[in-house]
Image (tube, rainbow, N blue to C red):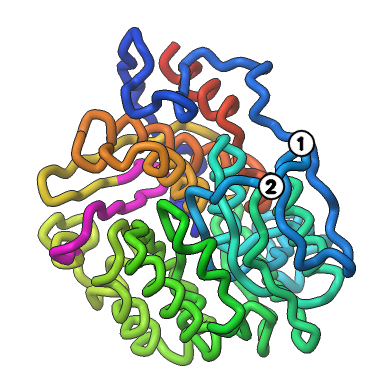
Amino acid sequence: MALQATTSTFSFSAPTFRSTPPHALTSKCRLSIKASSSSGLSSPPLLSLSRSNLKGRAFASDGSTQESPSVVCFGEMLIDFVPTTSGLSLAQAPAFKKAPGGAPANVAVGIARLGGSSAFIGKVGEDEFGYMLANILKDNNVNNEGMRFDPGARTALAFVTLTNEGEREFMFYRNPSADMLLEESELDLDLIKKAKIFHYGSISLITEPCKSAHIAAAKAAKEAGVILSYDPNLRLPLWPSADNARDEILSVWDTADIIKISEEEIEFLTKGEDPYDDSVVRKLFHPKLKLLLVTEGPEGCRYYTKDFSGRVHGLKVEVVDTTGAGDAFVAGILSQLACDLSLLQDEERLREALMFANACGALTVKERGAIPALPTKEAVLEALLKAVV
């Protein structure tokens, strides 16, 4: 989901980096402050998909089978149609830019763009948009072995209205769309069980059979010792009612290990309580939760664990479109946790990882669309370097 920017810039307090790379960002996950254009993180396009190989395995750029992805993202993948001119209604918009999206898919691509390993599990239509989305995953080095194609339903579409400040409203076309029809029997449980982190939202809880598939996938991950990451990603127009949305979102709350939530979602889930009040936020912190993250748009984020809490400021950028910024933030933090879960016990290192995640979110609002705007690791490091200087 996108960070909810309320102004045209993201504020930033320059960090103080140590002379050596932070411990949290070591080995292949190291985010060296000196950006390099020759680090080789941008992989060449992978094998294209066609009707004849839709169920084939994902391949690395050298043609060899990929190792098990560290982060498996479950849920919807769709096409966002974003107006080329902000500040107009959908009816008034002169043209739209076609952009791949869907929060879980955004996170999967975001992680891969940052040099991590990820997979996407979900369903699209056996149509040209579905084929396009499958190829986009492969082109971005995302494992799509768990992707399924429905011959009887279309790929979901969403038309997005942008205000002059880059904020959004959605009109969805999914009645039903293919993502709603994923069945438990279609799950790639082996892919899920081998992951380090299993990430999902709440849209997959709205209707059957996808709801049962969601619950079964999360159960399999939990039993295999996989960390569960949850971004409710509230989209009220998709739910039968606000009460139904609240009940279903909270129905899986206590099983998650990591939860990312926005200020608006806190207010919604607590029925109007102050999202800036730490005591209100702490009501959402269940006993088994390892990390609760609250995104604050231009202000950055807050973090809560059993032992410590705090705030990490954001990066100053001009806002064009907030679509996907929250997903970029999630990709940023999960990419680091997938490398080193001990970050959850070390506040200083966690703050460094969240600083990186905030920069991921901020850079995404500089372009239209979600997946097209997701940054590379080099771009994030360069932005942080400029902020320090």
Q: Check residue 298 for magenta coloring.
A: yes
**SS label for mark 2:** loop
Where on the picture, by quarter, is residue 173? Answer: bottom right
Q: Is residue 381 visible?
A: yes
Residue 98 occupies quadrant:
bottom right
In the displayed structure image, the side of residue 87 where residue 68 appears, left or right: left
Residue at the image point whose x is 48% and y is 84% from the top: 211
Horizontal and vertical percent position of residue 297: 41, 48
Work out which residue is located at the far top of the displayed protein and give it: 19
Q: Which residue is mark 2?
A: 65
Residue drawn where x is 52% and y is 47% of the image: 328
Q: What amino acid does circle 1 point to?
A: Asp
In this picture, which residue range is highlighted in magenta? 285-301
Q: Give residue 212's mark.
A: none
Image check: 223 left or right of 81? left
Instruction: Write the residue at 78% across / 42% down.
Output: 63
The residue at which mark 1 appears reads as 62
Q: Quadrant of the C terminus?
A: top left
* Residue 224 found in image quarter: bottom left
In the image, residue 380 sits, relative to residue 284, either above or below, namely: above
